[in-house]
Image (spheres, rainbow, N blue to C red):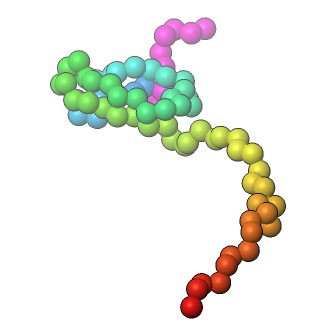
């Protein structure tokens, strides 16, 4: 039975006046959010706890072997 109450850790409040700005589920913020408090007009910047993981392709190790050898400096 959900009566509309949210746990305190899912409530996002203004850092200045503590007014409730919004409720979010854990890990719901994926990027930085800027929200202006309607009461005190403070700008609140929220960032995720951890950076999103990005799958990157593996590096090619054959690249160094493909480069031509360096030329010795001219005397």
Q: Nearer the viewer, residue 16 or 69?
A: 69
Residue at the location (65% across, 40% down)?
54
Q: Quadrant of residue 13?
A: top left
Q: Position of residue 60 (x, y in %)?
A: 78, 55
Where is residue 66? Give x, y as percent. 79, 63
Residue 36 placement: quadrant: top left
Q: Is residue 16 above or below residue 20?
A: below
Single out the residue that lies furthest toward the bottom: 75
Residue 18 in view of the camera: no
Q: Nearer the viewer, residue 55 or 20?
A: 55
> In the image, is residue 61 part of the stretch drawn in magenta?
no
Which portion, as a residue range, is magenta? 1-10
Q: Nearer the viewer, residue 18 or 38?
A: 38
Q: Main secondary structure of the magenta part?
A: loop
Tell me, yes or no, if residue 52 can be seen here: yes
Expressed as whole percent of the image width and height from the top left, the position of residue 75 reads 57, 91
Q: Is residue 39 left or right of residue 71?
A: left
Q: Is residue 52 above or below residue 8?
A: below
Residue farthest along the front direction in this orientation: 75
Q: Residue at x 19, y 24 (%)?
A: 41
Q: What residue is at 75 percent from the left and 54 percent from the top? A: 59
Determine whether, in the image, residue 54 is placed left or right of residue 34.
Answer: right
- Residue in view at x 73 percent, y 74 percent: 69
**Which quadrant of the figure contains the N terminus?**
top right
């Amino acid at each position: 039975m959900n009566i509309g109450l949210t746990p305190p850790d899912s409530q996002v409040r203004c850092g200045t006046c503590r007014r409730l700005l919004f409720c979010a589920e854990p890990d719901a913020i994926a990027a930085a959010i800027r929200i202006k408090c309607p009461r005190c007009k403070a700008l609140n910047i929220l960032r995720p706890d951890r950076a999103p993981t990005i799958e990157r392709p593996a590096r090619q190790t054959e690249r160094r072997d493909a480069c031509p050898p360096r030329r010795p400096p001219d005397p």
